[in-house]
Image (cartoon, rainbow, N blue to C red):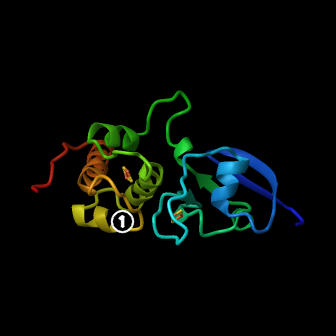
Amino acid sequence: MAEIQVIMTVNGKAVEARVEPRTLLIHFLREQLNLTGPHIGCDTSHCGACTVDLDGKSVKSCTMFAVQANGADILTIEGMAAPDGKLHVLQEAFREMHGLQCGFCTPGMIVRAHRLLQENPNPSEEAIRAGISGNLCRCTGYQNIVKAIAYAAAQINGVPFREAAE
Ligand code: FES
Ligand code: FES
């Protein structure tokens, strides 16, 4: 199949590659760019494990072709930490608040949470739950994921973290 040239920015770096038109963005990221943080957890566009940030929106990278991302600015979990390796506040928050168990959903969950906090820097518990409703977790029961995102929001806003009553 004829390949098509694509140019995009991925985690702050310019990327130029040739892809088959049928290549999904998730396969391009994982197999051609070796960015294996975004996961494939379903074949029905339900789980959100493949979530990346694309031009300021959370997208499920299994639902679009790589050629549709031509010219886009993409962030994956690999681009969240600082260049010196210091973890992003959300990554620290997930660690601190035990927001993961097996970790399969975590890359997509954190990238989604990052966009959620851009959209709403001070979300209520309800807004956090609604904001991550496209990302499924089979382990945690979500409680500590919600707590981790609220904790990260408090850190970013420089206010004390107050745990919601259970
Ligand atoms: S792999 Fe499940 S939504 Fe993309
Ligand atoms: S931590 Fe296992 S799927 Fe979320």
5 sits to left or right of 79: right
Q: Are there few (<14), some (14-19), or many (20+) residues within 10 Å of tag 1? A: some
Q: Position of residue 31 (x, y in %)?
A: 70, 49
* Residue at point 65%, 50% (across, down): 30
Asked if 49 appears above or below 37 in the picture, the reply is below
- Residue 83 on image: x %, y %: 56, 32
- Quarter assignment of residue 2: bottom right
> Residue, x 48% and y 57% (percent of image)?
49
Residue at (75% x, 68% y) in the render: 22
Give, as a three-letter code, the residue at label 1: Gly
Q: Name the residue nearer the viewer: 50 or 111.
A: 50
Question: Does label 1 point to a residue whose CB lies under 8 Å from ligand 2?
Answer: no
Name, please, the residue furthest toward the right: 2
Going by the picture, which residue comes out furthest to the bottom?
44
Q: Say which quarter of the image contains residue 18.
A: bottom right
Q: In the displayed structure, would residue 42 be above or below residue 139? A: below
Nearest the camera: 74 or 134?
134
Q: Is residue 46 left or right of residue 70?
A: left
Give the residue at x 47% y 49%.
107
Percent coordinates x, y for residue 158 in the rendering = 27, 42
How many marks do you count on the picture?
1
Question: Residue at the top extreme?
Answer: 84
Quadrant in which the N terminus appears: bottom right
Badge 1 marks a residue whose secondary structure is helix
Which quadrant, please, contains the C terminus?
bottom left
Left or right placement of residue 126 versus residue 87 in this view? left
The residue labelled by disc 1 is: 131
Identify the residue at the far left of this view: 165
